[in-house]
Amino acid sequence: MDKFLIKNTTRAEREKIVRDSLGYSDICCEDTSDGYDMYQPYIDGEKEISEITASYKANYVSESLNDFGNGRCRVK
């Protein structure tokens, strides 16, 4: 959505977007980094969320394909 683009948000808003979407606001976490670090480039205004997600998906698929080739895939 356009309202989440870097050009349409402040750094503080982007940080809140990430915290809210990871559920940190709901559980009152102040000092946690699980998942949060992945979105730091978005918070810093360097990459859009869609770019980070696409990169993560590409890496995940690549690792999954490597597991299949190494006989680690348990799909029958």
Image (cartoon, grey):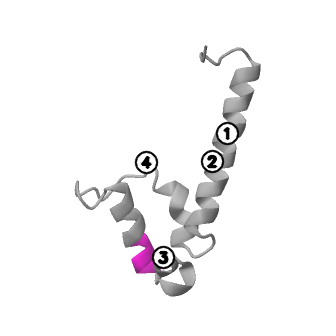
**What residue is at 64 percent from the left and 56 percent from the top?**
54
Q: Which residue is mark 2?
A: 57
Q: CA distance from mark 3 to mark 1?
A: 26 Å
- At label 4, counting other C-alpha atoms closer than 10 Å, the crowd grade (few under 14, some 14-19, many 20 or more) is few
In this image, 73 relative to 1: left or right? right
Q: Position of residue 56 (x, y in %)?
A: 62, 50
Along the line of sight, which residue is nearer the eye, 44 or 1? 1
Q: Which mark is residue 52?
A: none
Q: Secondary structure at mark 2?
A: helix
Distance of mark 3 from mark 2, alpha carbons?
20 Å
Q: Which residue is mark 3?
A: 4
Between discs 3 and 1, the one toward the N terminus: 3
From the image, tell me which residue sits under label 4: 34
Vertically, is 59 above or below 19?
A: above
Do the residues bearing badges 1 and 2 touch, measured as CB atoms within 8 Å? yes
Circle nearer the N terminus (4, 2): 4
Q: Main secondary structure of the magenta part?
A: helix
Q: Are marks 3 and 1 in contact (CB under 8 Å)?
A: no
Q: Which quarter of the figure has residue 53?
A: bottom right
Q: Amino acid at mark 2?
A: Lys
Q: Position of residue 63 (x, y in %)?
A: 69, 34
Kind of residue at badge 1: Val
> Could you tell me how far apart the alpha carbons at marks 4 and 2 are, in whole angstroms?
17 Å
Measured in 3D between alpha carbons, the distance from the residue under mark 4 to the one under mark 1, in whole angstroms, is 21 Å
- Residue range in magenta is 11-15
Q: Which residue is mark 1?
A: 61
